[in-house]
Image (spheres, helix red, strand yellow):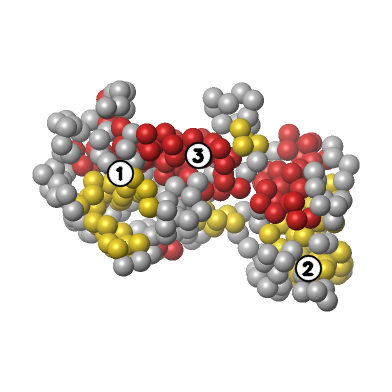
Amino acid sequence: MTSPDIENVVIVGSGPAGYTAALYTSRANLNPLVIEGFMWGGLLQQTTDVENYPGFPDGIEGPPLMQRFRDQAERFGTRFITDQATKIDLADEPGGVHSVWVDDEEHKTRTVILAMGAEHKKLAVPGEDELGGRGVSYCATCDAAFFKEKPTMIVGGGDSAMEEAIFLSKFASKVVIVHRREEFRASRIMLDRARSIDNIEWLTPYVPEEFVAGDGGSLDHARLRHASSDEQLDVPVAGVFIAIGHEPQSQLVTGLVDVDDEGYVITEGRSTRTRRPGVFAAGDLVDHTYRQAVTAAGSGTQAALDAEWYLRDTPEVATPPGMPDGDLAEAQWAEPA
């Protein structure tokens, strides 16, 4: 019998992967605990129109979509700690007990699902950190209203950059898209949408060199360098939005599980298993290829199933009360009590 002081499942992180894992494990009567972080909901909390998530033919905004994810998991008994995990210790042997800390509070658990996601990547140029919140941002959805009728800039060439530019164009007097190459990684449909908007301009191939403050301490202009000629160009802007990719938030487990050169957690084959028994990883923490809400949710399902099967098949871990066979694949169809 599992000790009442030891959790069956602790999920570190939220977003589509974490909340879907919580939904599946809670429906299996595993009573999961989610340490969801202060900025719960993942990067979709910073997204406006989500048009490609199944089941929403008219689209839905990111924040209400994530609220629905969370509400559904909570309906089946998921518990939440809206705080940051600060330390993780992982057992080496099958059936061992892992520990996840929130400050001084330790949570012991038979399984851990890692779903910390990814964060926006930085340029690491002078002025970027210093002008954070004073002209430099990573989320047009969050900050566009501060730049109404002001000149702005987007740095990046993928779908996220185009989405940011399209949203920002509704507020700013103009949006200059800066990219280091002539070609863009963005999909054709997103490029066409951005190119159809009158107040979006294009500046390629240029690389940001520095963000420079004005007399009042806020951003005054961006200093760019031509990628081929090294010619410098100063572009007056009130706001710059960085949209160049993401960094997996694997710092808590680096050295505890295997990660690749970019910091993405490595899992075994097509499973969500890490090299630590009873530790699973899902979502953008492992996915540097697709990075979609629906694929993250799918991998959250896989992690939940893998965790349940581990609990079922590992002798040292008792089957949770009220679930003699521990079969999540069947339990997911059961009506809530």
* Mark 3 vs mark 1: in front: 3
**In terms of depth relative to the viewer, which is nearer, 36 or 229?**
36
- In the rendered image, residue 142, in percent from the top left (x then y), is placed at 66, 51
Label 1 neighbour load within 10 Å: few <14, some 14-19, many 20+ = many
Left or right of 66, for residue 278: left
Q: Which residue is mark 1?
A: 32
Distance, label 1 to label 2, CA atoms, is 45 Å
Asked if the residue at tag 1 contacts the one at tag 3, i.e. Cβ–Cβ closer than 8 Å, the answer is no
* Mark 1 or 2, nearer chain start: 1
Residue 224 in which image quadrant: bottom right
Three-letter code for the amino acid on which mark 3 is drawn: Gln
Is residue 151 visible to the viewer in this orientation of the structure? yes
Distance, label 3 to label 1, CA atoms, is 18 Å
Three-letter code for the amino acid on which mark 1 is drawn: Pro
- In the rendered image, residue 22, in percent from the top left (x then y), is placed at 36, 40
Q: Which mark is residue 67?
A: 3
* Mark 3 or 2, nearer chain start: 3
Three-letter code for the amino acid on which mark 2 is drawn: Leu
Which quadrant: the N terminus?
top left
